Amino acid sequence: MRYIEPHGHMVSRTTDDYQAMVMAGCAAVCEPAFWAGYDRKNAHGFYDYFLQLTEYEPRRAKKYHLPHYTWLCINPKESEDTKLADDVIALIPDLLSKPNVLGIGEIGLNKNSRNELLILEKHLQLAADHDQLVLVHTPHLEDKLKGTRLILDAIQNFSTLRPERVIIDHVEEHTAPLVLDRGFWAGITLYPESKATPHRAIDMLELYGHEHIWLNSACDWGHSDPLAVPRTALEMRRRGYDANFIDQILYQNPLQFLSQNPRFKV
Ligand SMILES: [Zn+2]
């Protein structure tokens, strides 16, 4: 089988993880900028992180013959400090020309605060000004439904940001229809403890169709599984889905979305 890991925080993972992913059929990995497990003190910390995402990590992935792409932003958690967020956003335009950058992400909301929303809007302006794809993180648990609505409304205030160029990630049963009905792409994140399990993800595919949806593992610094996507393929086989269906969901769907940026090649 072949698959694309469209959302993996590889700076947190080991070389064994890279090897296992490639052996399981991974054809490309995409790494949105996110929280590093601690709050960075200033914009220099982010600049170094952006260089890690655009220079060092692609070289590390290349040792395993895996194309590595990235998305740039300051994540919603650290956006609470709006002065820091402004300084970080100012760094991004010069870095958009790096050959592995696919767009702006993962932006969004964490606690649905006023400051987070303000910085989300600044990122959306940045994406609109530079004609970038957008990858959005939605909040956890009790904040998810309200946060998703706030995010969709904020995006739709920008007439030049077309919904088919925006993916709303970490959707669950109660948010997937909102996202898909408005013409956005939806990402389902497979996590061992929170977000979606393989069973729930496949249930959602059965409920909401299999177009404009991708699956990802997120595989970050916390408890997560870099092989969650191929593990879900095995579960699909158990439910009787054939290889063509699995290929469509795990390979062709992310390829269709990501190829809207001509830099993305597998
Ligand atoms: Zn993430």
Image: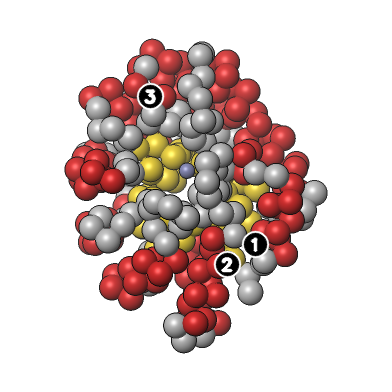
Q: Mark 1 — residue?
A: 26
**Is there CB contact under 8 Å for labels 3 and 2?**
no
The reply to whether the C-beta atoms of the residues labelled 2 and 1 are less than 8 Å apart is yes
Which residue does the image show at 36% across and 66% down from the upper left?
Answer: 200
Mark 2 lies on residue: 230
Residue type, label 3: Ser
Q: Residue at x 70, y 59 (%)?
A: 20
- The reply to whether residue 98 is visible in this rendering is no
Position of 202 relative to 155 (above/below): below
Q: Residues within 10 Å of mark 2 (few under 14, many from 20)?
A: many
Query: Contact, CB < 8 Å: mark 3 with mark 1?
Result: no
Q: Residue at x 65, y 48 (%)?
A: 68
Residue 38 spot, x, y in % from top left:
51, 25
| Among numbered discs 3 and 2, the one appearing first in the sequence | 3
Q: Quadrant of the C terminus?
A: bottom right
Q: Position of residue 126 (x, y in %)?
A: 40, 31
User: Label 1 sits on what residue type?
Assistant: Cys
Place of residue 180 in the rendered image (x, y in percent of width and height, measured from the top left): 28, 61
Q: In this figure, which residue is indicated by the disc labeled 3?
A: 79
Q: Which mark is residue 208?
A: none
Cβ(mark 3) to ligand 1 < 8 Å? no
**Beta carbon of the mark 1 residue lies under 8 A of ligand 1:** no
Figure check: 23 above or below 48? below
In terms of secondary structure, where does tag 3 sit? helix
